[in-house]
Image: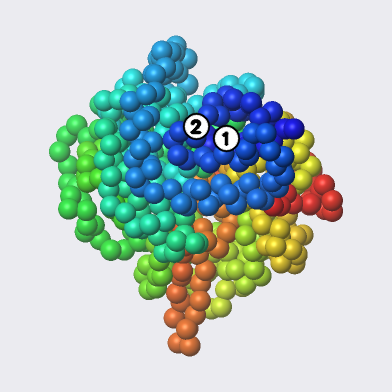
Amino acid sequence: MPEEWECRHCTFVNSAPPNGIACEICLNPRSMHSDGLLPERATLGKATAVPSRLELERERLQRQAARTVSEQAHVFGKASAGVKRKTQNDDSAAGLAKKVARAPGQHKIYLTAIDGYPNTDRYISFAEVLQPSQLKSAFMSAFQLDIHWLTGIVPKNVPVCLALHNPEPTGPLKRDNYTLVFPRLLSKAYSTMHIKLCILFYDSYLRVVISSANLVKYDWDTLENVVWMQDFPRITSKRSLASNDGTTSETSHDFSSQCLGERFRRDLIDLLRDMEAGEWVWRGLDEFDFTQCSARLVVSRPGKFGGDDLRRYGIGRLSSIASEMGVERSAEYDLMYQTSSLGSLNPTWLTDFESAAGGNLLASSTPTSSHPSLKIIYPTVETVQTSRLGANGAGTITWQRKSWVSSSAAHHLLRDSVSKRTGALSHCKIIVCSNATGLDGTDSVDGYYYCGSHNFTMSAWGTVSKSKGTRMQLTVNNWELGVIVSRKEAVIPFETGSKMRPHGAGRASAYVM
């Protein structure tokens, strides 16, 4: 009788005979139990009840949270010693340099190149992002990591600092050319280190990559993810720089008062220091020129914030940027949010989020929703089941049934997440704010585009509360990171307009666990 087993590389739930030895999706071998990371689900020769998908997902999350630092170190040791390196030179292909080449300082937004679909200049692979033969050192962070896959791509002589999720407070851990750091969490049960960031050092430039993709083959080769990337040239002449002790000479977070590129660099340094990245990582940023950067960082970090810090993190940061970009002066705008995970859609929080997206959350008056037609882009049962991967491949598309039921008042906001690449499943997190019209009927505001790691959840963006003295406080659970750029630069992977379908009943309802 077939049993279901979850691939530890890509989370695909395989249905295979007891002697199945490889994942149907990523083709990685099943026999990983010697690593001590994946316990057997069934005993051969015994009749075993097939667990539900919810049970499988709960077990996966429990295993992930229960991994100790020593187990992670054990895996690193085995991976670095035992992985045979690929012989193909992925990043030296004739078309690669042409594909990623662009004028210095220009950013680009890609979607991940998915196996089985046409690979054009709009799509990019992890090897194309990394360019391993030219890489000198790197910082990377993700919620999920496949170290066997990563060490098969990153050259063994390249120093790498990895920031990973760990529920237990843990100091840095060094193994071979890797240093592991574990950013501190607010809560073992509810906090997550969810940032997907790569900072890649080369001889003549620095590459910053912010995406929705984890450091697993499945996210880069099989799921649809969004990738923002920009190269920054090395400084060749001396110029005045901010203090290199990691502190900033200005405390203001008003974007209009300083160069966007300098603000981006300082915000990135602050984030890396907060994540306890190696000193060589954040100090190294001072060697590169960020003046051509026009993107704005959106950071969430676990904690409680008030005063000026409200503008630095989560939903407060979103509001501050939207206001700076002029959205608060608009009478009308369209707001679409594509997400791969949802929680409780609390009416009060929805109002706060809409106010933040419109640049009004931090206004002195009580936030009110100025936008009644927010669209939340999340897949239906039918879209998941008829995708190329099917329901077994949707392990990272999550909405607990009880949260879906409790959010019934917001179901009218839901729209199906249908990829323009027919049959693809999306793991993207995208906000599109567009079609804004000025209050005087003549001024138009371009709007903005967000991409990154933030799902549409309170844990990712934070919640605001007010004390008796109307002092506002922001509470954030997760580490998250994204960028905001002009709406004109938007890359929208899902169907819009007349092809966008509202959720309904049965197979047309939300895909829940």
Residue 160 picture location, percent across and down: 30, 35
Residue 126 picture location, percent across and down: 46, 28
Residue 433 picture location, percent across and down: 60, 52
Identify the secondary structure beneath mark 1.
loop
Q: Nearer the viewer, residue 196 or 172?
A: 172
The residue tagged 2 is 32
Q: Residue at x 44, y 43 (%)?
A: 142
Identify the secondary structure beneath mark 2.
loop
Q: Residue at x 71, y 58 (%)?
A: 401
Give the answer, above or below, for where 16 lies relative to 385: above
Q: Nearer the viewer, residue 63 or 301?
A: 63
Which quarter of the figure is the N terminus placed in?
top right
The residue tagged 1 is 7
Q: Residues within 10 Å of mark 2 (few under 14, many from 20)?
A: some
Q: Alpha-carbon distance for marks 2 and 1?
A: 9 Å
Residue sticking out furthest to the bottom:
468
Its colouring scheme is rainbow
Q: What amino acid is found at the position of numbered circle 2 in the picture?
A: Met
Residue 284, picture quadrant? top left
Q: Is residue 75 left or right of residue 234?
A: right
Q: Nearer the viewer, residue 394 or 470?
A: 394
Give the answer, above or below, for where 89 lies relative to 266: above
Q: What amino acid is found at the position of numbered circle 1 in the picture?
A: Cys
